[in-house]
Image (cartoon, rainbow, N blue to C red):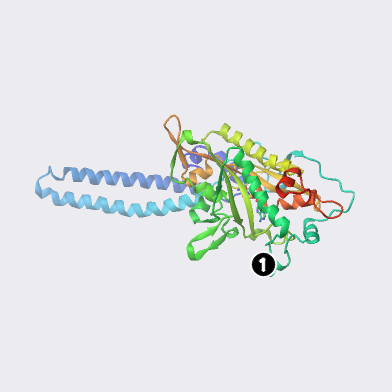
Amino acid sequence: MLGLDFIRANRAAVEKAIADKGVTLDLDNLLSLDSEVRALKTEIEALRAERNAISARFKSVPPEERAELGRRAKEAGARAGELENALAEKQALLTELQMRVPNIPWKGAPVGPDETFNTVIRREGEPPKFDFEPLDHVALIEKNDWAELGRIVQVSGSRTYCLKGRLALLELKLMGWALQQIADAGFTAISVPAIAREQAFINQGQFPGHVEETYALPNDDLYLAGTAEVALTSLHSGEILEGDKLPILYAGISPCFRREAGSAGKDVRGLLRVHQFFKVEQYVICEADDAQSAEWHAKLLQLAESLLKALEIPYQVIETSTGDMGLGKFRMNDIESWVPSLGKYRETHSCSTLHDWQARRANLRYRGSDGRVRFAHTLNNTALASPRILVPLLENHQTADGRVKLPPVLQELMGGEFL
Ligand SMILES: Nc1ncnc2c1ncn2[C@@H]1O[C@H](COS(=O)(=O)NC(=O)[C@@H](N)CO)[C@@H](O)[C@H]1O
């Protein structure tokens, strides 16, 4: 979220961000609540000062005046107590609104309400030209008996998957390989739970806006996260990190759970959009410096691209529009991988810069070299998410006889030329 001082001082920019991100938020209401809260705080402080002044004088006045003084002190205290309740109420309303204020998108983001305004920045790798009728990933899986996509539905319901044999082995080796690649780039490998408390979802930004997309465990006041980003954003919550310990670089791995509440009818066939999946996540906590954030954004993107190049999957890098990037983003670049059976590129990675929008929510701060304590900047990007990545992987590398020829890096992992 944005600081109140920033919102007051940059009202026009915040109004524009609200409009460009398609957020419904009454900024006037927020600002009037803000001034009410500040007025109440001033009044309470004055009452406290009055009561203290009276108490200080208590000993030096003649006894007959003490009863009156005592009454006035008590009155001031009681009045302060009433105002404290009003303050707590208004403060809660103000914080709830402040949580919904969008980050200011960078000036290079296409302005528009949704993904149709996203633009292609560049393409890497040529989509394969098959001299045979290519199969889609479901047909390839069925032909090679690499999963129980039918049976598992009666066990676990729709949007679940159950890989078998060498494809099951490939999925976990791929996750381990991706984790190793990001660790080799200097990130600390860290496996985090999907289970997390409500505050972690508020800190990361999933709440309050997307509660319905999140699996809840109401008996335990817990939820299941759809990304390691949730746990990683709050791992150091409440701490004041030493500046020289930044940037903190995590290669997070976790199971991910998503209700996909808003996706009815989308990607219902196969592995593209499932309720539970694995993801290796790149996560950065760096100093509150826009240039540093921009460098890390480029680095996270380059690392994800290096994995796609090693897997020999053609892809394009997208500049995400203001309406599609989400509340907390300053900048978001998706990477879309070529899916032959669809004849189009589909999102497999999402790289985001959030500046201090998450850190302010998570109370994630650091002491700079100048001794000042500031909220940090956070960034995240997908390294690899499975099973979605298996779709372009299988389809782009299929052969006429329905096998899958592995790219060299996977031939080593899987001990053979073919899956
Ligand atoms: N329901 C799903 N099924 C399969 N894969 C998914 C699903 N939802 C997301 N993913 C994969 O996870 C990637 C990241 O998801 S994201 O919501 O776009 N972004 C994040 O979670 C960020 N933390 C960056 O990883 C997606 O690009 C996609 O590859």
Q: Secondary structure at mark 1?
A: loop
Q: Which residue is mark 1?
A: 157
In this view, which residue lies farthest toward the right? 131
Amino acid at dot 1? Gly
| Residue located 78% across and 40% down the image | 125
Q: Nearer the viewer, residue 336 or 33?
A: 336
**Mark 1 Cα within 10 Å, few/some/many (few <14, many 20+)?**
few
How many marks on residues? 1
Q: Nearer the viewer, residue 257 or 198?
A: 257
For the point 24% across and 46% down, the residue is 51
Q: Residue furthest top?
A: 370
Q: Outermost residue toward the bottom?
A: 154
- Specify the quadrant of the image occupied by residue 313: top right
Ligand 1 within 8 Å of disc 1? The answer is no
Residue 231 to residue 367: above or below: below
Vertically, is 195 above or below 378? Answer: below
> Where is residue 303 shown, x and y percent of the image?
65, 39
- Residue 338 position, x and y percent, is 77, 47
Residue 244 is situated, as x and y percent measured from the top left of the image, at 47, 33
Q: Where residue 262 appears, x then y in whole percent?
A: 65, 59
- Of residues 40 and 306, the one nearer the viewer is 306
Q: Is residue 401 left or right of residue 210?
A: right
Res 119 visible: no
The answer to whether residue 193 is seen in the rendering is: yes
Displayed quadrant of residue 13: top right
In this orientation, which residue lies closer to the viewer: 94 or 39? 94
